[in-house]
Amino acid sequence: MEGKELLELAATAADEKKADHLVALDMRGISLIADYFLIGQGNSHKQVQAIARDIKKKAQEQEQEVKRLEGFDEAKWVLIDLGDVIVHVFHKDERHYYNLEKLWGDASHVELDTVST
């Protein structure tokens, strides 16, 4: 699965769990970590965990390796490493503090085809 397809898969899974304010950043040429970042938030610890759990499940169903999942128990900032795509699921109270969109301000935004508005 190509990076953009994996990004759409993760975004769809997050959207299905009602993640708020989904933003995709194109990290190619900016970071060696991944091609894309997907950033979203949940309104409660349970929702953050549900979003992360569903992204992991959908990736594994497509035989995509989940290289790392961190922060799940605390559910303040869950990082899901899918290789070409890194997903950041924040609790709404934490997202503004870390402000990854500003930190990676040089990255262009990617239009997400599968996310409802």
Image (cartoon, helix red, strand yellow):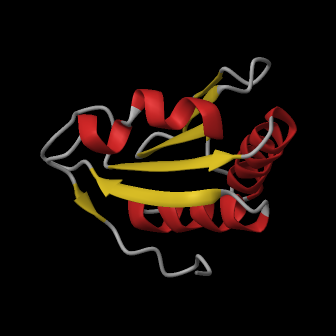
Identity of the residue drawn at 21% across and 36% down: 31
Res. 15 in view: yes
Q: Is residue 88 above or below residue 18?
A: above
Q: Is residue 12 above or below residue 77?
A: below
Instruction: Specify whether 75 is left or right of 37.
Output: right
Determine the image quadrant of residue 91: top right
Identity of the residue drawn at 67% across and 25% down: 76
Q: Is residue 55 above or below residue 72?
A: below
Q: Nearer the viewer, residue 45 or 66?
A: 45
Quadrant the C terminus occupies: bottom right
Determine the image quadrant of residue 47: top right
Q: How many marks?
A: 0
Q: Which residue is at the far right?
A: 46
Identity of the residue drawn at 36% across and 37% down: 100
Q: Position of residue 69 (x, y in %)?
A: 65, 27
Q: Position of residue 50 (x, y in %)?
A: 83, 45
Q: Position of residue 102 (x, y in %)?
A: 26, 41
Res. 66 in view: no
Identity of the residue drawn at 61% across and 40% down: 89
Q: Position of residue 74 (x, y in %)?
A: 75, 18
